[in-house]
Image: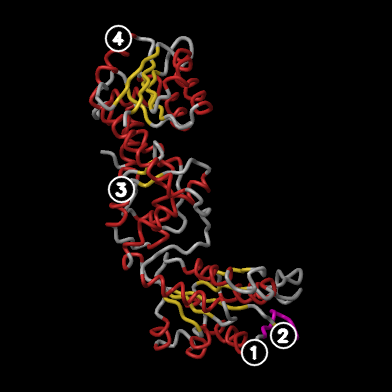
Amino acid sequence: MSHRILIVDDDATIRTALADALGAPDLVVASADGGAAALAILDRFAPDIVVTDVRMPDLDGLALLRLLRERAAGVDVILMTAFDDMPTVVSAMREGAVDFLVKPLDLNELSALVERVLADRSAREADKSRLIDAPVADDRTLVGRDPKMIRVYKLVGQAAATRATVLVRGESGTGKELIARAIHANSAQSDQPFVTVNCASLPATLLETELFGHVKGSFTGAVSTRRGRFALAGRGTIFLDEIGDTSLDFQTKLLRVLQDREYQPVGAEEPERTEARVIAATHQNLEAMIAQKRFREDLYYRLRVVEITLPPLRDRPEDIPLLAEHMAERAAASLDVERVVLSRDALARLSAHTWPGNVRELENCVMRAVVVASGGVVRPEHLSIGSPQDSSADAVPTLLDLEREHVKRVLSATEGHKGRAADLLGVSRPRLNRLIEKFGLE
C-alpha cells in the first residue's frame, strides 16, 4: 500500500530537495508552491501527510493547517519553520500539527519523522476495527482479565445482590473506591445516593459531625442544624475510605450504627435510624492494629461480612495493556482531545514497570501521555514513569509537560547549542539554563 505526501513551500529548490529525500517505492510525493495551491489539489491528491513551510506569501502554513483540520481532518501535518517562528509553532502544535522541523532541514531527520508518522497512521488504522460499537469508557467500569480480578468481580456481584456490609482491602491506588461504586451501581439501590467520606482527612470530632450531623447550638460554631452523611445517603451507600485511620472512640460509635442501625447526631437527644449500606476500605493491616489495641476487633468482624481484597497491579501485569488502553480512552474524552492509540513499544514499557502507586499511578502516567502525544499515538518517549509525582493522588497533567517537551525538542534540533536554542526559544541564556535545570535536561 502506497502513502501520499504533499510538500508545500514557496521555494522550488526546497520542494525538489524534499521530494528527492522522500522518494521511495511505497511513497507518492507531490508538491505545491503555496497554501492556496495545496488546497487546490487536496481533494484530487488526497495526501496522508502534508509537509508545509510556515511562512509563505499567499496562505501561510498555520492558516493552511486550520483549513486542513476542517477539510481533511485525517491528514497529518508537519510544519517546517525558521528559528523565529517558534511562537507560531507552539500555537500550531496546540491546533493539531503532528510535529515540526527546524530549518535548515536535516533530511535524515525528515525521513525518520515521516516514517514514524506513517507507522502511527498504521497503528490508528489497525485500531479502528476495535472501536466499532465499542462501549463508551466509564469511570465505574472494572477492567482486568487476571484470575485474581475475576474473583473480585464475582464478589462484587454477590455483594451487590445483598445489603451486606463490605470491607474492601488493598494497597493505596488499587481502586478500592471503584469497587465500592461498582457494588452500589449493580445493587437494587443504585438510584439512591452514593456518599463518600475520607476518614483519614478529618479529625475524630469533625468526622463524627460529618457522618452523624449536629443540632443547632451543640458546639461553638454550630449556628444551624446540619444533616450528616448517613442521613444524606438515605437507602443508598456510604463509603468510608481509610477506616483504619479512625479513633477508637469513633469506632465505638460506628459499631453501634452497624449493630443497631442507629446513630446519635451531635447534641441531639434522640437517635436517628439509617438504612444506608456501609462499605469500608483500608490499606492498613487491621489484624496487626487489633493486636496493638488500635482497632476494635468487634468492629472488624462487623465490617468484613463480605471482604474483597484487591491485588496490586504488579501481581497482574497482563492487565496493564488493557487498563492503559481503557484509561487512554477515558483521558482523551475528559481532556476533549482526539482519541490516541498506545504503540506496542509504549505498552511494552508500561508492562515492564512495577507500578508501586498501582492503578492510580498508571492512570496519571497515561493521562500525561495523552496530553503530550503527537500524531494520535503514544510512544515510549511520551511516558513519564518512575518519578515520585507519578504515584501522587493529586498529580494532574499541566502545561509544564508541554513546556518541557518543547525545550527538549529545541535543544535536540540545535544539537545542544545553548546560544542557538536560547534564540530559538526567545529567552536569555540564564533563563535557558534555569529551564534546563528545572526539567532535568542537562
Q: Quadrant of residue 431?
A: top left
**Type of amino acid at the residue the image marks with label 3:** Arg
Residue 411 in sight here: no
Q: Earlier in the sequence, mark 3 or mark 2?
A: 2
Q: Earlier in the sequence, mark 4 or mark 2?
A: 4
**Type of amino acid at the residue the image marks with label 4:** Thr
Mark 4–mark 1 CB contact (< 8 Å) = no
Residue 197 in sight here: yes
170 drawn magenta: no
Q: Main structural element of the magenta stretch: helix, strand or loop?
A: loop
Region of the chain picked out in magenta, as a range: 262-272
The Cα atoms of the two marked residues, 4 and 3, are separated by: 38 Å
Residue name at image x 74 percent, y 82 percent:
268
Q: Which residue is mark 3?
A: 344
Q: Nearer the viewer, mark 4 or mark 1?
A: 4
Residue name at image x 25 percent, y 21 percent:
23
Q: Which residue is mark 1?
A: 260
Mark 2–mark 1 CB contact (< 8 Å) = no
Secondary structure type for disc 2: loop
Classed neighbour count for the residue bearing mark 1: other residues with Cα under 10 Å, few (<14), some (14–19), many (≥20): few
Q: Which mark is residue 271?
A: 2
The Cα atoms of the two marked residues, 4 and 1, are separated by: 86 Å
**Type of amino acid at the residue the image marks with label 1:** Asp
Q: Which mark is residue 13?
A: 4
Q: Nearer the viewer, mark 4 or mark 3?
A: 3
